[in-house]
Image: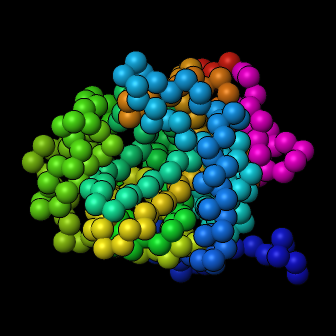
Amino acid sequence: MSAQQHSFPLTAGELADFHRRGYAGPFTLYEPGEIARQWARTRQDLTDRSGAVYRDTCDGSGAASLSNYDRHLDNAFLADHITRPRIVDRVASVLGPDVLCWRSDFFPKYPGNEGTDWHQSATFASACGRPQIQWPRGSGPGGCLTVWCAFTDATADMGGLQFIPGTHRTMYYDETKPMRYDPERNISVVKNGVRRGFFGYDYRELQIDPHWQPQESKAVSMELRAGQFVLFWSRLLHASHPHAGLTQQMRMGFSARYVPASVQVYPGASEVEEYGGRAGLDRYGAVLVSGEDRFGHNRIAASTTTGHVFRHRNSSPPTAP
């Protein structure tokens, strides 16, 4: 059997653990030397934004936080990464055979950076005030599967991930509430003795119960070596440690986010807006990574003849149901 014919679904035990805890892994995708070489080259390639999906990313204040969203649509290594069977087969074990990758983004932490605050998401409406993904009514729990891959080591003292197992069953935040973007106020706030922030927002503004606090005593650290990944529900309470600065190496995580093909992506929207940035969706398309799209309500990016880079279809936004 060739490498291309291997399949990598979650085992019955791994799937049961996933449904109980809300996460699975770590799994190895690349050897450390391989990802070091790939990331060094890709990091240079990403400076060329001529094919990037989001071009106008300023909101009038100079913010450009969306500039490297969805670079899998124009970068060959990232396009191949999101379609890797070691990822897609495990995602399909949870979501079913028809799967879209609807977003990817980078999560760097530099020496001395604060940790990322506890958060969870079912609709990703928290920053813009409207759902970015929408499951069919009554069809599922909401949210997406996030595959977070360590392009560098991601230990606890370098800003590694934290999870509170089992919390994907309950939403502690109301994503319809407004959240004020104020990076001067909301960066590196000390919460329960830990410096935490959330990219210019205070996620506590969304709490359903203003007096509720995450049970950090139940948190587990997910330490990943370079080339490993973990998959988790976006509804799972997750955070990250601060980068303690014990090494001068940055921590770089790359997340790819997956939903069943039945889920509507950016329903009724013509632009994406969050974290101080705004950009049109006219060049955006979700990527079908498994099965087929039998629904037809999402923009789908088509692969080029040169490999897994995807061209952008100019199409009108899908309408809300």
Please tell me whether residue 211 belongs to the stretch shown in magenta: no
Vertical position of residue 300 compared to residue 98: above or below: above
Residue 13 x %, y %: 53, 80
Residue 295 point in image, percent of width and height = 71, 35
Corner quadrant of residue 86: bottom right
The residue lying toward the viewer, choosing from 65 and 90, is 65
The figure's colour scheme reads rainbow
266 over 316 or under it: above or below: below
Give the x, y percent position of residue 37. Answer: 66, 68
* Residue plotted at (77% across, 46% down): 309
Q: Residue at x 67, y 73 (%)?
A: 34
Left or right of residue 106, residue 80 in this image: right
Quadrant position of the N terminus in the picture: bottom right
Q: Between residue 157 and residue 70, name the one nearer to us.
A: 157
Q: Quadrant of the C terminus?
A: top right
Question: Which residue lies at the image location 21% right of the left edge and 41% below the top edge?
Answer: 186
> Going 46% across and 24% down the picture, which residue do you hit?
58
Magenta highlight range: 291-315
Instruction: Report whether residue 303 is seen.
Output: yes
Query: In the rendered image of this protein, does residue 99 appear above or below residue 28?
Result: above
Height in image: 156 above or below 299? below
Q: Position of residue 173 (x, y in %)?
A: 27, 44
Magenta-colored stretch includes residue 302: yes
Kindly report the secondary structure that dominates the magenta region of the rendered protein: loop
Please identify the quarter of the rendering in which residue 267 is found. top right
Q: Is residue 62 left or right of residue 39?
A: left
- Viewer-side residue, 74 vs 166: 74
- For the image shown, how many numbered marks are present on the structure? 0
Is residue 22 in view? no
Q: Quadrant of residue 136?
A: top right
